[in-house]
Image (tube, grey):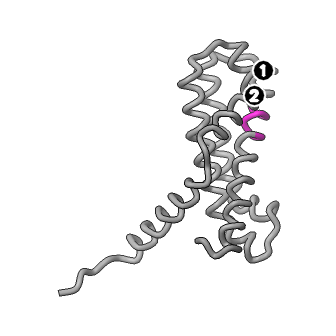
Amino acid sequence: MAVITSLAEKRQEKQLRYERNMLRELSLEKLRAKVLEHFLSFYTTYRVFPSVVEEGCIDLAIEAYLLGARYSRFGYYGEKADSVRRRCVQEEKYLVDTLFDFLCFWGGIDEDLVSQSLYYACEHYIGGWWMEGFERGKKRRRLKLR
């Protein structure tokens, strides 16, 4: 008797395999360096628990990286990065808002000026990782490494 699998299960397996392959190209040292590069002033000013904040930032960077990689197929077929980015603007905004709320919680930030600059830093951080995933995904597709 044959085993029946659904199309949804097959899609999920394929997506997980693709994400694992994409994550092999990402190093933990690079993730940590980018966190320090973007949020070093946040660490020194608010003296939060650095390991907790670092882990949260790394988790969201991975999510943004995988989101960009997922949408890289549109770039492979010739669509510009800006127009592809507009397709996933809600998901990217969710990641930015999550990171911002996370940092505000751990830093106890209520000031408008500080929170506005922190929000822009979060946007830049998530956007950078989205673009990194997008470019790496496009490269993998060009090399037929899906």
Magenta segment's dominant SS is helix
Q: Residue at x 75, y 69 (%)?
A: 75
Q: Which residues are magenta?
A: 118-124
Magenta stretch containing residue 52, yes or no? no
Horizontal arrangement in the rendering, residue 54 relative to residue 74 (left or right): left
Res 98 visible: no
Horizontal arrangement in the rendering, residue 112 relative to residue 35 (left or right): right
Residue 88, located in which quarter of the rendered image?
bottom right
**Looking at the picture, does residue 103 appear above or below residue 80?**
above
**Residue that label 1 marks:** 114
**Residue that label 2 marks:** 118
Three-letter code for the amino acid on which mark 2 is drawn: Leu
Horizontal and vertical percent position of residue 26: 61, 49
Magenta stretch containing residue 119, yes or no? yes
Quadrant showing the N terminus? bottom left
Horizontal arrangement in the rendering, residue 31 relative to residue 83 (left or right): left
Horizontal and vertical percent position of residue 40: 73, 23
Residue extending farthest bottom: 1
Front residue (pair 32, 109): 32
Q: Is label 2 in contact with label 1 (beta carbons under 8 Å)?
A: yes
Horizontal arrangement in the rendering, residue 9 relative to residue 140 (left or right): left
**Looking at the picture, does residue 46 appear above or below residue 19?**
above
Indicate the secondary structure of the residue bearing disc 2.
helix
Q: Residue at x 59, y 29 (%)?
A: 54
